Image (cartoon, rainbow, N blue to C red):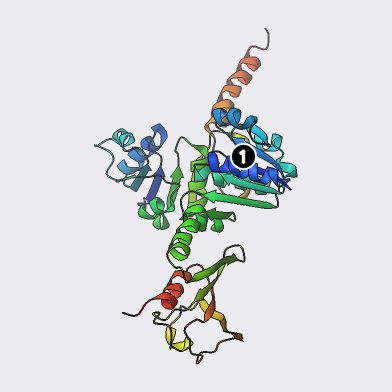
Amino acid sequence: MKALLLGGGRPLWFLAQTLARKGHAVTVVSRDAHECAHFANRVAATIVHGDATDPGLLEDAGARSAQLVLAAMANDADNLVACQVAQRWFAVPRVIALVNDPDNQEVFAALGVQAISTVVTVASLVEQRVTIDQVTNLIPAADGRVTLTEITLEEQNTAVGRRVVELGLPRDALIAVITRAEQTIVPRGETQLQVGDRVLLVALPESHPAALRLLTTNGG
Amino acid sequence: MKSLYLVIVGCGRLGSHLANLLSRIGHRVVVIDKNPDSFHKLAAESFSGTRIEGDASEAAVLRQARVDLADLVIAATQADNVNLMVASVARRVFRVEHVMARVYDPARESMYHELGLETVCPTLIAGEAFLDLVRRASGNGGGR
């Protein structure tokens, strides 16, 4: 795959290195002349120094034949414009912005640009995985619009002994499957949760934290 | 004249000039700039609007300025991309009817017209004025 990475900073150069090692053709476009010179001999990527929001420069960097453009500049306005140019001017099939302001994830989506927020992703990892040992799996699905989580119920959880209907799960969250010893159960409202149940929760990101809390709150 | 609710992003020479003028003739004006020092260009005797310190490429700042209620948004910061983003967000997220962005670099103008944004390019306007002078000079001086 031919990938164009726009921006700078160490994580971006490491990403370029990682993709290049996996055999992808990587081009980095960076405004920072110092970084360009520094990484020129260290990263197996084509390096272009300049403004990645300039259509002429993007064309020189190979935007016409790129399969992926990732915009990860320090300024979200630059990311938006670069993505719009890549989409509209060069018809790049996959264009992603790495936004700085987490609010902009939604704003970019409204403007037709797919956006990822490291802040949102890391915050949800910190919130869900690091603090809750019960969570054994956390898989974003459908481009991050749905989260699948597996939770093992422990004795002290108030959810234990309750029926699914009594949990009061948010509207956009549901328990898809319960694994209980050797049994796999597709639960109904009256299914009662037991200690050791492995619960597969399917939720939209907005409802995910609340649903997770309902399942992992401890009785006092 | 109907009094309008106007949001001006960027309090540089252009932004402050418009803010002073439009506030003086009775419009309700909000000016946003990320550098509070730039507000000194708003003249006490003419500007009676609101100043907001913040980066207008953050949606929260536009919300604080109540862009959703604006009749008109003018994006006139020093950065083309910020102007284009502010105009896009005002038009397509906050559904403001009249939006205009100042853009120095004419390279992307056609794309933004496709996206339904109105832009004004000082480079092209100045260029046109100078070319006009050249045309007049070459026309008048035909004998030489």
Side of A132 where B103 appears, left or right: right
> Outermost residue toward the front?
A181
Residue at image x 48%, y 37%? B79
Residue A65, quarter of picture: top right
Q: Which residue does the image show at 39% across and 50% down from the upper left?
A: B61
Q: Nearer the viewer, residue A177 or B85?
A: A177
Quarter of the view holding residue A139: bottom right
Q: How many marks?
A: 1
Query: Residue B129: percent from the left, percent from the top?
Result: 56, 25
Answer above or below: position of B107 versus B7: above
Q: Residue at x 51, y 90 (%)?
A: A191
Q: Eyeballing the image, is B68 above or below B24?
A: below
Residue A35 at what x, y percent from top left?
A: 56, 31
- The residue lying toward the viewer, choosing from B98 and A212, is A212
Q: Residue furthest top?
A: B144
**Residue type indicated by callout 1:** Arg
Between B30 and A166, which is closer to the camera in this rendering? Answer: A166
Relative height, residue A151 to residue B133 (above, below):
below
> Residue shown at 67%/39% (left/top)?
A27
Residue A208 image offset from top left, x and y in percent: 48, 70
Q: Position of residue A149 (x, y in %)?
A: 54, 71
SS for callout 1: helix
* Residue sitting farthest toward the bottom: A190
Instruction: Report crowding for label 1: few under 14, some 14 to 19, many 20 or more residues within 10 A (C-alpha).
Output: some
| Letter of the chain that mark 1 sits on in the rendering | B
Q: Which residue does the numbered mark 1 point to in the structure image?
A: B108
Of residue B138 and residue A171, the one placed in the foreground of this image is A171
| Image quarter of residue B11 | top left
**Quick check: can you spot residue A54?**
no
Would you say residue A37 is visible in this rendering? yes
Locate the C terminus of chain A and report the quarter of the image it occupies: bottom left
